[in-house]
Image: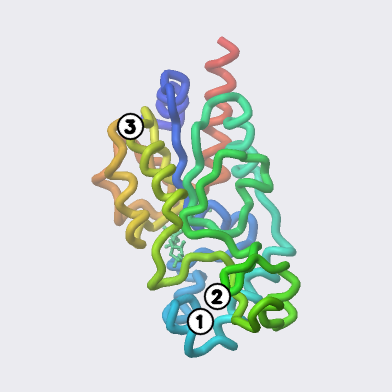
Amino acid sequence: MTTSTLAKWMLQSNSTVILTGAGMSTESGIPDFRSRTGWWKNIDPRTVASVESLQQNYELFREFYQMRILSLTNCEPHSGHEILANWEARGLLTLIATQNVDRFHQQAGNGAVAELHGNIVTIRCQTCGKALPLGHFMDNAVCTYCNGKLRPNVVLFGEALPQQAWNRSLHAIQNADVVIVIGTSLEVYPVNQLPAMCQGRLVYINLDVSGNSRNFDLILQGTAGGVLAEIDKYLRELIAE
Ligand code: OAD
C-alpha cells in the first residue's frame, strides 16, 4: 500500500480529517519539539511553557514566547500547507485538527481548523482574560485594563485544552472515513488519544515512524510536503480518469 492507496481512500471517503503536529511546519523553518533540533532538546518545557513558569518565572516565559512569535515573521506556509488548503477548497477535507500554534493552516487558506493547543499570535490578559494586541505583549506591556500579565492564547502544560476545539476534533475524527495524522510524535496527552477514536482508515505521515507503527492502517514515511505532493499527484490523476 502506498500514496496511491490513500488517494483512492480519500476519493471514496465521505469525511477525511487531518491531525497535524509540529512536523507539519518544520519545512517552513520552524523547529519541532522532540527531534534532534527540537525546542525541548535544549529547554525544559516546564521552565518556559507551563502554568508555573507563567506564575513564577514570567520574564523567561515571556522571552520564550516573544522569541517564538518573532521567529514566525521570517517563515511562511509551505507547499504541503497549500495542498491541504486546496483539498478543503475541493471538498476533500472536513477538518484540520492541529496542535500547531503558528496559524499556518489558516494562512494557507484552510477555514475548517480546530486549534487544539491554541495559538501564539493572539494575546490575552492572564488575570482579566481581555484580548489585547500582539504588540503589547512584544513590548513587555501589562494589561491596560487591570495591569495583569499578558500571555499568548496558547495551551500551557498544566492547562486544559479549549473545549470547543477538542469537541469539534473528537466528533470529526469519530465520524471520519479517513483520518490522516501528519508530523506528530503522538507523545502529548490528550491529543495522542485522538487517533484511536477513528473508526475508519487511519494513516500516519511522519519522518520517524518507529514509535507508532502498529496502530495505523497505512504508514507513509517521509516529509509532510513530499508525501502530500505525491498523494495530490495521484488524486489529480484519479480525478482526471
Ligand atoms: P514533536 O516534536 O513531538 O513531534 C514532531 C514529529 O514530526 C516527530 O516525530 C518528527 O519526526 C516529525 N517530523 C519532523 N519534521 C517532519 C517533516 N518535515 N515531515 C514529517 N514529519 C516530520 O511535536 P508534536 O507531536 O507536535 O505542546 O508535539 C506535541 C506538543 O508538544 C506540541 O503541540 C507542544 C509540545 O510540547 C505545547 O506546547 C502544549
Q: Position of residue 136 (x, y in %)?
A: 73, 75
Mark 2: give few (<14), some (14-19) or many (20+) Cα within 10 Å.
Answer: some
Mark identifier at residue 54: 1
Identify whether 125 is placed above or below 171: below
Badge 3 marks a residue whose secondary structure is strand
| Among the two numbered marks 3 and 1 on one chain, the one whose residue lies closer to the N terminus | 1
**Residue lying farthest top?**
241
Q: Nearer the viewer, mark 2 or mark 1?
A: 2
- Give the residue type at disc 2: Gln
- Please state, as top left, top right, bottom left or bottom right, where the N terminus lies in the image: top left
Looking at the rendered structure, which numbered label has been put on residue 33?
Answer: none
Q: Which mark is residue 126?
A: 2
Query: Quick one: SS at disc 2?
Result: loop
| Relative height, residue 53 to residue 121 (above, below) | below
Q: Position of residue 103 (x, y in %)?
A: 62, 54
Between the residue at mark 2 and the residue at mark 1, the CA separation in whole angstroms equals: 9 Å
User: How far is the residue under mark 3 from the one under mark 2?
Assistant: 41 Å
The reply, left or right, for residue 6 in relation to residue 119 is left
205 relative to 66 in the view: left or right? left
- 10 Å neighbourhood of mark 1: few (<14), some, or many (≥20)? many
Q: Quadrant of residue 28?
A: bottom right
Q: Residue at x 24, y 46 (%)?
A: 214
Q: Secondary structure at mark 1?
A: helix
Q: Residue at x 31, y 30 (%)?
A: 200
Callout 2 touching callout 1 (CB < 8 Å): yes
Q: Quadrant of the C terminus?
A: top right
Residue that label 3 marks? 201
Name the image colouring: rainbow
> Does residue 212 appear left or right of residue 21 in this picture?
left
